[in-house]
Structure formats: C-alpha cells, structure tokens
C-alpha cells in the first residue's frame, strides 16, 4: 500500500493581489498548500485563499505589516502553527514608491529596506530555524527554499525609484549570502521580472507599447513569472543565483523607469 506524500506548504507574501496572487494560484495548481500573506487587502486575500483551496485542498490568509519587525518575525511561526510545517517562502510583497537623488531621504530608504530587504531576510532566517527544528525531530526531508522577487532594472539601472532600487539591490546581494549561510537546509533563488503588469501610472496603450520593448518583442507575463517561481522552488539544484524573466529587457538601455517613460 503506497503512502501519499505529505503536501508541501509555501508562504507567499503579497499574495492577495496582482503578481503575488498569480504566483499563489500557480503553486496551488502544482499541489502546494498556500499561506497567503497580505497587509491591507483582506477581502482580496480571502478570495485568493478560496481559489487556492479549490486547487490544492488547503489555504489560509495571514496579515502582517512588513514595516514592523515583530510582526514579520511572528509570521512564519503563525503559518507553521496553522499548517504544521512550512517548506518554502516566496517573497513577492514589495514597496514601490518614487524618489530620486534629489528627493532621497533616510526615511524613504529605511521604509523600503524594512519591507523589501529586511522582511525577506527575516523570513528566510525563520524558515531555516524551522527546518533545523524539523531535522532535530528526525524529519529526513527537512529541506526548503526561498524565492525572492527582484527586478530586471538591477541589471539595467536608471536614476528613478532610488530607494526602491537600492532595497532590491541589497536583497539580491543578500540572496548570495543567504544561499551560503543557510545551506544545505535552504536554497535561495532570485526571480527578476521585467515589465509585467500595468498600473495607475500607465495607460493600457502605453503599457502594451512598453511591454513590447525587448529583444523578444515581449516582456514577462504574470504566468511567466509564476512558472519560474514554481521551477525555482521545485528544482533541487538551484541556489545562489537569479533567473531573469523579462524577454531580455535587461539587455537594453532605458534612461527612465517604465512608469515615467
């Protein structure tokens, strides 16, 4: 009589809406139980949980403000308490506020570093500790992964969104250090999309025009990014590197951020 493998559980931050939701649904389609993190979009989180639960059989939502270190540190233990274990973290939540070299302030930088850099590091730290505890309890399968959502603009810099870019650059560097420090229990992989979804800063026509600006004639879609996240989580030999999913936009020079072009 065969025994069904125990379901894997992933915490996806910022999963209530937009790209985080697409990632959550793709992982649920692959059989992952999804812990949906959100900050303010409670109803959207509930809707995402319902959609994930239909696909994977189990999902739940968890609120946390990533500017609050105590809230971040409490998040993964809350997910463990609900599901019994966690096998992976996808850091999709991101603060994206405009500043420049002229408007830069310590406050703006700290705000972005807390949300975009500090929180992902703390969650990786917490996952590693959880896996150490499982190993000590005799769990021979205690291995996990962290995927950090980055940005192609790290390889194609322009002067816009200075604090945001610095926070993502710090997270990219942290990925290398964490891959070394947390091995062999935790793999750490970056996924860097190009222009993927439109926003209030772009009209639909402008978005389509900018989305086509790449060597492949198209940048990333939410499905492209979600599929890459799933690949990174499930390929046991990848760590300490970043997968650029942008249609080659990082190979082109843009003088301004897409939202300001």
Image (cartoon, rainbow, N blue to C red):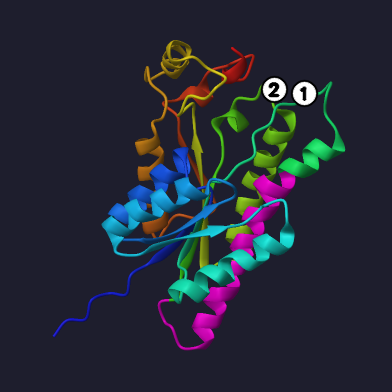
Q: Which residue is mark 1?
A: 100
Q: CA distance from mark 2 to mark 1?
A: 6 Å
Horizontal and vertical percent position of residue 92: 53, 46
Q: Nearer the viewer, residue 66 or 181?
A: 66
> Which numbered circle lies on residue 253?
none
Task: Say which residue appears at 50% left-offset and 81% top-offset.
Answer: 134
Task: Say which residue appears at 64% left-offset and 67% top-offset.
Answer: 74
Is 143 situated above or below 88?
Answer: below
Q: Quadrant of the N terminus?
A: bottom left
> Which numbered circle lies on residue 160?
2
Task: Say which residue appears at 68% left-offset and 61% top-offset.
Answer: 71
Outermost residue on the front side: it is: 43
Q: In which image quadrant can residue 222 be found?
A: top left
> Magenta stretch: residue 99 in it?
no
- Of mark 2 and mark 1, the one earlier in the sequence is 1
Q: Secondary structure at mark 2?
A: loop
Q: Is residue 216 left or right of residue 123?
A: left
Q: Nearer the viewer, residue 46 or 253?
A: 46
Q: Are marks 2 and 1 in contact (CB under 8 Å)?
A: yes
Horizontal and vertical percent position of residue 109: 78, 39
Task: Say which residue appears at 59% left-offset and 61% top-offset.
Answer: 124
Horizontal and vertical percent position of residue 156: 60, 25
Q: Secondary structure at mark 1?
A: loop
Q: Quadrant of the C terminus?
A: top right
Q: Is residue 78 left or right of residue 67?
A: left
Task: Magenta stretch: give its range.
Answer: 113-141
């Amino acid at each position: 009589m065969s025994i069904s493998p125990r379901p894997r559980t992933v915490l996806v931050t910022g999963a209530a809406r937009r790209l985080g939701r697409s990632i959550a649904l793709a992982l649920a389609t692959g059989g992952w139980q999804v812990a949906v993190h959100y900050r303010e979009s409670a109803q959207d989180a509930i809707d995402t949980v319902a959609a994930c639960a239909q696909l994977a059989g189990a999902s739940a939502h968890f609120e946390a403000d990533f500017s609050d270190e105590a809230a971040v540190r409490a998040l993964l233990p809350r997910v463990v308490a609900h599901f019994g274990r966690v096998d992976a973290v996808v850091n999709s939540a991101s603060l994206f506020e405009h500043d420049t070299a002229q408007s830069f302030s310590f406050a703006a930088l700290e705000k972005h570093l807390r949300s975009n850099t500090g929180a992902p590091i703390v969650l990786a730290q917490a996952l590693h500790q959880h896996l150490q505890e499982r190993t000590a309890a005799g769990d021979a399968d205690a291995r996990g992964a962290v995927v950090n959502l980055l940005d192609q603009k790290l390889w194609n810099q322009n002067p816009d969104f200075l604090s945001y870019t610095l926070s993502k650059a710090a997270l990219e560097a942290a990925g290398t250090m964490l891959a070394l420090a947390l091995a062999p229990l935790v793999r750490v992989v970056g996924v860097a999309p190009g222009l993927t979804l439109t926003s209030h800063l772009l009209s639909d026509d402008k978005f389509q025009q900018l989305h086509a600006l790449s060597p492949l004639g198209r940048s990333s879609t939410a499905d492209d990014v979600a599929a890459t996240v799933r690949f990174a989580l499930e390929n046991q030999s990848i760590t300490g590197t970043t997968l650029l999913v942008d249609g080659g936009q990082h190979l082109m020079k843009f003088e301004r951020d897409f939202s300001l072009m």
